[in-house]
């Protein structure tokens, strides 16, 4: 297992070298004008608008209600609807369903069997309720994520005090398309165990991620990922057990290699500063790379999405030393530690925290969260839309791309071993350099007076490479995938 601790100087060196900043399309706040409003999850609609799910106080019937907000593609609010009973109702996750509607998951103590229960609401695109369900026992039970499954149902992750081995345990629920419970499973020790997200994998298994305090000799948290079969039977588990205190909040499958990425935070023992943490696990459930980044702030990652087998986008917050305000962040990394672009969002210099980031239809990203002391309300849900970056995807420090795409052709990509370059006109001087995924130079050659070339790179291992082209003073770069 490879473990990397990166300093703030190195991280900033990458940031300034690639000069990458995702352009912000819009940044807006939402909620009820007199209460507390939180944004937890968001989906994009077919018309490029959004539905955001969270919670609000002072608007509906209870102490807090599920808050649903629909916006247009520019983030302009179209409607806001509360859902809930007389007590506490909170939404933590929203996802699209196979029939064109949306499923919301959270928790409630307005109805159900116990103090709190997992709460699931299905809605249409107008926010109208199609069904509501609760799940749980006589004690407290919370739902934190819901994901559609290939059989038309859903997998839910959370925590339970009603069942299991100890104080609280991982809680996994499988329900069908109409909300009927098919099975429930618990996993844990005799102390704290909390699951934050569940996903279905390409082969029909489920992965449940969270943390446990029951495995560490010094009572610190360890990241735990549990793999379940389709029927809920436990297959195996993965633990990131270090001498630090680690928590994981999000998991994403890495296609096409079908490993997965996990994100969260790592805090050294006897420290109050959280380090930015994420790691990759292969499809055999062996941890391959761990990235713990000290960016000089106290940083927590709430959400991760895998763009492919090597690139991830993360979101969460950082807390600067000596500053009382968190600022929201969204960043892309290549192979874990090579910074691609980043957005630090400190709305009106108020405390901000992003809970989820999703890809958008235009190739950009959208992050949802909460900002304190910004209207409407005492705090507000916030939505930030970021455009595509258009930057090179490597930590290799390259000049800005200046070769137009129509000036040369680059094929095939992916390749099984041959690399072809064809230029629109003859170039007098050409330098071709290839870097592997670790940033190491693996090929370099100079050419003169050429318009076409072919190189045999069949000796390269399968994986992602970066090609640098310098021709007559212009510089360009391209990704290359070798897949034999």
Image (cartoon, rainbow, N blue to C red):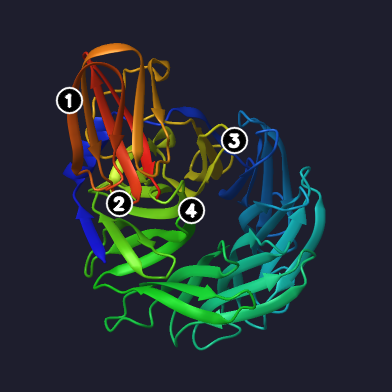
Image vertical order of residue 202 relative to residue 58, above or below: below
Q: Nearer the viewer, residue 437 or 234?
A: 437
The image's mark for residue 461 is 2
Q: CA distance from mark 1 to mark 2?
A: 23 Å
Image vertical order of residue 474 relative to residue 144, above or below: above
Q: Earlier in the sequence, mark 1 or mark 4?
A: 4
What residue is pinned by disc 4?
255
Left or right: residue 349 versus residue 187 is left
The image's mark for residue 361 is 3
Q: Earlier in the sequence, mark 3 or mark 2?
A: 3
Can the viewer see residue 157?
Answer: yes
Q: CA distance from mark 3 to mark 2?
A: 33 Å
Residue 424 position, x and y percent, is 38, 13
Write down the quadrant of residue 419 in the picture.
top left
Please tell me whether mark 1 or mark 4 is closer to you in this view.
Answer: 1
Label 3 sits on a secondary structure element that is loop
């Amino acid at each position: 297992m490879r473990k990397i601790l990166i300093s703030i100087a190195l991280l900033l060196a990458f940031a300034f070298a690639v000069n990458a900043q995702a352009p912000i399309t819009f940044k807006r706040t939402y909620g009820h004008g007199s209460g507390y409003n939180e944004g937890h999850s968001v989906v994009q609609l077919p018309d490029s608008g959004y539905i955001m799910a969270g919670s609000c106080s002072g608007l509906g019937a209870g102490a807090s209600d599920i808050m649903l907000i629909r916006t247009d593609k520019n983030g302009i609010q179209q409607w806001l609807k509360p859902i809930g009973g007389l007590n506490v109702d909170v939404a933590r996750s929203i996802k699209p369903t196979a029939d064109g509607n949306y499923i919301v998951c959270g928790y409630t103590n307005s109805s159900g069997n116990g103090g709190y229960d997992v709460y699931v609401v299905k809605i249409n695109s107008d926010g109208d309720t199609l069904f509501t369900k609760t799940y749980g026992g006589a004690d407290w039970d919370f739902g934190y994520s819901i994901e559609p499954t290939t059989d038309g149902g859903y997998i839910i992750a959370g925590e339970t005090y009603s069942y299991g081995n100890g104080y609280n345990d991982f809680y996994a629920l499988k329900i069908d398309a109409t909300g009927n419970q098919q099975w429930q499973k618990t996993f844990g020790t005799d102390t704290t165990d909390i699951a934050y997200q569940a996903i279905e994998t390409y082969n029909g298994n489920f992965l449940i991620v969270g943390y446990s305090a029951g495995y560490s000799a010094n009572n610190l948290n360890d990241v735990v990922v549990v793999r379940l079969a389709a029927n809920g039977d436990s297959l195996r588990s993965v633990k990131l057990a270090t001498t630090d205190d680690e928590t994981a909040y999000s998991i994403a499958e890495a296609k096409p290699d079908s490993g997965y990425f996990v994100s969260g935070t790592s805090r050294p023992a006897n420290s109050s500063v959280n380090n930015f943490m994420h790691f990759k696990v292969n499809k055999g459930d062996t941890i391959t790379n761990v990235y713990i980044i000290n960016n000089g702030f106290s940083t927590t990652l709430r959400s991760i999405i895998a763009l492919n087998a090597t690139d991830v986008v993360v979101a969460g917050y950082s807390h600067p030393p000596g500053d009382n305000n968190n600022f929201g962040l969204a960043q892309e990394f290549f192979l874990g530690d090579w910074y691609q672009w980043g957005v630090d969002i400190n709305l009106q210099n108020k405390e901000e925290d992003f809970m989820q980031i999703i890809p958008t239809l235009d190739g950009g990203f959208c992050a949802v969260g909460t900002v304190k002391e910004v209207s409407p309300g005492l705090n507000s849900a916030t939505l930030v839309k970021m455009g595509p970056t258009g930057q090179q995807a490597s930590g290799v420090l390259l000049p800005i791309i200046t070769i137009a795409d129509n000036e040369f052709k680059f094929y095939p990509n992916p390749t099984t071993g041959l690399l072809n370059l064809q230029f629109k006109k003859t170039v007098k001087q050409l330098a071709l350099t290839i870097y592997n995924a670790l940033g190491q130079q693996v090929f370099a050659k100079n050419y003169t007076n050429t318009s076409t070339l072919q190189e045999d790179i069949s000796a390269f291992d399968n994986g992602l490479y970066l090609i640098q082209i310098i021709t007559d003073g212009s510089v360009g770069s391209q990704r290359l995938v070798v897949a034999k």
